[in-house]
Amino acid sequence: MGTLESITSRPLLLLIAGVKGAIGSTMVLASHIMRRQPEMITSYLTTTALWSDNGAAAPVHVAGWDVSQQSMSKTLALHRVVPESLWRKDRDYLDDIQLAPAPKTGLSVSAQVDQLLDDIDVFRKTWPDAQPVMINLLPACSECGCATGAIDEMDGGRFPDLAYARAAIQAGIPVVNFTPNDLDDPALVTAAAEKGLPLVGRDGKTGQTYFKVVLASALKARQLRVDGWYSLNILGNADGRNLMDPDCARGKLANKTELLDDVLGYQVGEAYGESAHKVHIDYYPPRGDAKEAWDVIDIKGLFGLPMSIRVNLQGRDSILAAPMALDLARWVLLLQAVGRGGAVPELGFFFKKPEGETPATTYEDQLRELRKLEAFCREKLAT
Ligand SMILES: NC(=O)c1ccc[n+]([C@@H]2O[C@H](COP(=O)([O-])OP(=O)(O)OC[C@H]3O[C@@H](n4cnc5c(N)ncnc54)[C@H](O)[C@@H]3O)[C@@H](O)[C@H]2O)c1
């Protein structure tokens, strides 16, 4: 086991599945800008105190896969997440980044894994000193098929996430699943645990749901009873368009919905005989990545008298998500270093549906778990 310094001072290699998506391309740019103006990025990370004990942040290299053939600069322009003035002078660098084409749809999972392992080999040879992490940023899709048995021969195009995660674990690389997609393949989970490789997820808790957990925890602490909670999102990026497909939205909506009752410890809407927690997502092209969310929260106080709260978040989907994915990459490296493989429920702070046994549900408990995990890693790596 190394020391904390030996981990935080080494370069990081992000291997991103879906690297030309809205979040992936934002991470590419952030990693590049981090080299010349570290504070422009590190001041928005939650791991900075943990990582910068030893001065300047270590370089972050990015490689990865996408089905898109577009150049990175064209990709950034199309996503409209970051203004062109912030990356125009980096165009040549961005277009030269070493990326690989995604395995072809129609290949079996095992054939996809073989191709990905070859690519990982090339990426590792390019940055031999860097510590790799696989980050899953593929589109949301509810079709997993993990329970069907013959996974190896399954068409990898139906659930590409599985091939990326399997290739990573086979190559000894930890995995962050930022998507709502379920990677619950028993062979994969067992292999990750046995090899001491964190396999963490799922569904980044970036905007509306983050504030929902904070507010619900605060209401619970004051014994204010939630009578109903109506949440609406509009967004105009590719994720939003994809989520108009009910099959793709199912997992995401379930993750956004289920956690409220878990935080509060009772069923919202019990008195009405049905859930009074409603979550809607609507694709609205004019907004691009600038997601807006509304929450109407009906609560009851003393004597059962009603009160109501309105929350309006005018956010930026990928600007909220990219630093979290980078934080998670750092976390899994630390956890790998201390031999903590498999699911890590203590990272529930970052996810809508934290994997693992009995993850904490309220905001203060999730934060406490995270602090404890940090202390545990620091202690283990102190010698
Ligand atoms: N932005 C947020 O706040 C947020 C929060 C939680 C979860 N997520 C999830 O994160 C994921 C990424 O979000 P995004 O906004 O970047 O999505 P996106 O649609 O912009 O990006 C997905 C990328 O994956 C690529 N892709 C598709 N199939 C592929 C394959 N087989 N191999 C490699 N690449 C492939 C696409 O070409 C695209 O570039 C989604 O699942 C989303 O639901 C996002």
Image (spheres, helix red, strand yellow):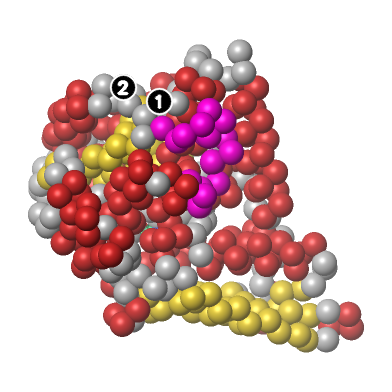
Question: Which residue is drawn at the image coordinates 41% and 61% (left, top)?
Answer: 319
Report which residue position mark 1 lands on.
10
**Looking at numbered disc 2 in the image, what kind of residue is underneath it?**
Asp
Which quadrant of the view contains residue 357? top right
Is 87 displayed left or right of 341 in the figure? left
Report which residue position mark 2 lands on.
129
Q: Is 358 in front, or is 51?
A: 51
Question: Which residue is drawn at the image coordinates 68% and 35% (left, top)?
Answer: 372
**Looking at numbered disc 1 in the image, what kind of residue is underneath it?**
Arg
Is 369 displayed left or right of 175 in the figure? right
Is 104 displayed left or right of 328 in the figure? left
Q: Residues within 10 Å of mark 1 (few under 14, many from 20)?
A: some
The answer to whether residue 113 of the structure is visible from this angle is yes
Where residue 156 sits: x, y (%)?
A: 19, 45
Mark 2 to mark 1: distance in Å? 7 Å
Point out the stretch of residues depicted in magenta.
42-58
Residue 43 inside the magenta-drawn segment: yes
| Label 1: element kind | loop
Where residue 91 sits: x, y (%)?
A: 18, 54
Q: Residues within 10 Å of mark 2 (few under 14, many from 20)?
A: few
Residue 187 vertical position relative to residue 200 in the rendered view, above or below? above
Residue 137 inside the magenta-drawn segment: no
Q: Earlier in the sequence, mark 2 or mark 1?
A: 1
Mark identifier at residue 113: none
